[in-house]
Amino acid sequence: MNQGNAALLPQGGGAYRGRCGGCPIGAMIRPIDYRTSMEGVPVRYVLADALQIPTYMDAGVAALKRALLRARLNIYSPQTVELLSCLQNVHDVFGIWEWDERLRSIARRFGLSANSLQRAA
């Protein structure tokens, strides 16, 4: 989020990686683990039941799970996935003028330091 604008997909929606940077989750994914199939996959799907995920996203969900695990994120923790989902939502949905306020709100919600969350995002 340090790039000062949202990384967006050509057809709309946020991107894990883009020409101008990426979302906070994409920043945690090592380049070697990144797959274009992840794009368009909400991070909340890493904990979703397989029947809740559109089948065309199966490869992207699997790649995202693998990349997040290799980034040493506990994707089996509902709280971790909820935090990641909140960060993804801030990047993908809100205007950049709202990011600081939203990140402070997320920090309060999860008992984190707003400064460290902003640095990580």
Image (cartoon, rainbow, N blue to C red):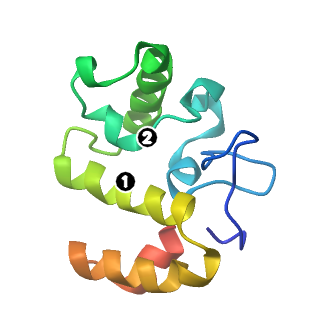
> What residue sits 42% from the left and 21% below the top?
62
> What residue sits 26% from the left and 18% below the top?
50
Using residue 51 as the reference point, say whether residue 34 is left or right of it.
right
Answer with the quarter of the image where residue 4 lies: bottom right
How far apart, in angstroms, are the residues tagged by discs 2 and 1?
A: 8 Å
Q: Position of residue 99 (x, y in %)?
A: 53, 78
SS at mark 1 in the image: helix
Q: Which mark is residue 42?
A: 2
With respect to residue 37, does 43 lie above or below?
A: below
With respect to residue 35, does 97 lie above or below?
A: below
Q: Which residue is mark 1?
A: 85
> Is label 2 in contact with label 1 (beta carbons under 8 Å)?
yes
Please rate how many residues cluster around mark 1, counting C-alpha atoms within 10 Å: few if below 14, some from 14 to 19, many from 20: some
Taking the view exactly as shown, the residue that stands out farthest to the right is 19
> What residue sits 38% from the left and 84% below the top?
104
Q: Position of residue 52 (x, y in %)?
A: 27, 25
